Image (spheres, rainbow, N blue to C red):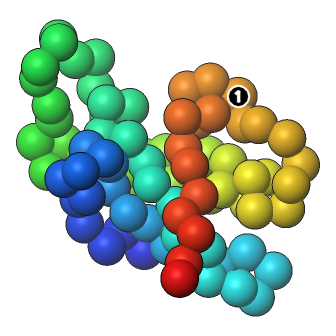
Amino acid sequence: MEVLGRDRETESYRVIVDVDGNKVSALVPERLAADLKIGARPSHQAAYVWMAGYKDKIEKAITQLAQGKGRPRAPFDQITLVKEH
């Protein structure tokens, strides 16, 4: 999994995962990185540490979505794929 940085519009981190030999882009909401109070957000460091700790589950969720095998379990069901133009 490669983290490309934060997308301000969606308040998510853009990641790339190899799925069946294809690079799949997805948005991982930053709110998943911590229990947040309304209006708060994790630091970049906290978000990156969280993503590293949950790398396998994030990759599994993205693979499941990319292969059309249903929705991942919460909270990873909040991850969305990005359609490339």
**Is any part of residue 48 visible from this angle?**
no
Up-down: is 35 above or below 7? above
Residue nearest the viewer, comparing 36 with 83: 83
Expressed as whole percent of the image width and height from the top left, the position of residue 55 reads 51, 54
Q: Which residue is mark 1?
A: 73
Task: Point out the residue furthest to the top here.
Answer: 37
Relative horizontal placement of residue 82, taking residue 19 as reference (left or right): left
Q: Which residue is situated farthest in the right direction here? A: 69
Closer to the camera in the image, 33 or 52: 33
Taking 29 as reference, is 55 above or below it?
below
Q: Whole-percent x and y of residue 65?
A: 74, 53
Residue 39 horizontal/vertical position (percent): 12, 19
Q: For the point 61% across and 46% down, which residue is it?
A: 57
Secondary element type, mark 1: loop
As drawn, 46 above or below 81: above
Q: Amino acid at mark 1?
A: Arg
